[in-house]
Image (spheres, rainbow, N blue to C red):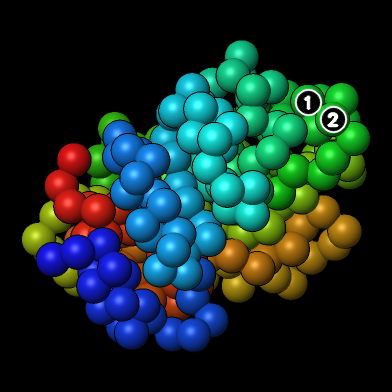
Amino acid sequence: MSIDNNLAQITSALPAACTLVAVSKYKPNEAIIEAYESGCKDFGESKVQELSQKAEVLPKDIRWHMIGHLQRNKVKYITPFVHLIHGVDSLRLLQEINKQAAKNERTVQCLLQMHIAQEDTKFGLSLEEANDIIARLDDLPHVKIMGLMGMATHTEDTEQVRREFATLKGLFETYKNQERENLQMRHLSMGMSGDYLLAVEEGSNMVRIGSAIFGTR
Ligand SMILES: *Cc1c(COP(=O)(O)O)cnc(C)c1O
């Protein structure tokens, strides 16, 4: 299967309002160009250095998504150009993004990464931590929380995956009622190659898909 065919197949299975973020980590620029020429403008990377190198040489109208775990000391390298940071998993990280965004005279869009999986290996905020961050947003004028991100447990148990996605969707709706200038629930980023159809059924409007587009890594 070609990248073009894979994209066509996935896109036809997604609702029109669902944004497809093509996860291009570890894939060469040629593969990204192929997807770009098939109409894809949103790409996700999980490593700061790889993201920066690709952004420098690839078309300027690509919207770059930082989907991986982000270390505070690396925030400065991506704040000038990043479109959306999916993996905000601590207040200190968000404070650093705010600081670097101010330096760049930008407002940087972020998603709060919530811990929804049963595995303790997955990064993410507890409900308490997320509430704490949201209570402090007035002090962080250079970031905008645009939604939530989560990763379900890697399991064959589809009912469990469904429950985890439904939990995130519920929280998304709760925060919708608390919207203000820098808290706007637009994006619910959940679903990867193995579980995006379930995620969409549970209300996802942003899926992050890598191997189903570009092949295994
Ligand atoms: C790698 C990655 C993906 C894409 O995974 P696939 O299974 O290849 O679709 C999605 N989200 C995050 C956070 C990732 O690190």
Picture coordinates of residue 142 (x, y %)? 84, 40
| Vertical order, 197 against 60 (above or below) | below
Q: Which residue is disc 1 drawn over? A: 100
Picture coordinates of residue 19 (x, y %)? 50, 69
Amino acid type shown at disc 2: Asn
Comparing 186 with 66, the one in front is 66
Q: Which residue is disc 2 drawn over? A: 104
At horizontal 47% and vertical 69% (from top left) the residue drawn is 39
Q: Is mark 2 within 8 Å of ligand 1?
A: no
At horizontal 75% and vertical 43% (from top left) the residue drawn is 108
| Element assignment for label 1 | helix
At horizontal 67% and vertical 66% (from top left) the residue drawn is 185
Residue 190 visible, this angle: no
Residue at the extreme top: 73
Q: Are marks 1 and 2 in contact (CB under 8 Å)?
A: yes
Comparing 105 with 69, the one in front is 105
Q: How far apart are marks 1 and 2 (CA)?
A: 6 Å
Picture coordinates of residue 87 (x, y %)? 52, 40
As drawn, is 16 to the left or to the right of 106? left
Q: Residues within 10 Å of mark 1 (few under 14, many from 20)?
A: many
Amino acid type shown at disc 1: Gln
| Image quadrant where one finds the N terminus | bottom left
| Element assignment for label 2 | loop
Q: How crowded is mark 2: few (under 14 residues within 10 Å), some or many (20 or more)?
A: some
| Vertical order, 79 against 205 (above or below) | above
| Vertical order, 79 against 213 (above or below) | above
| Image quadrant where one finds the C terminus | top left
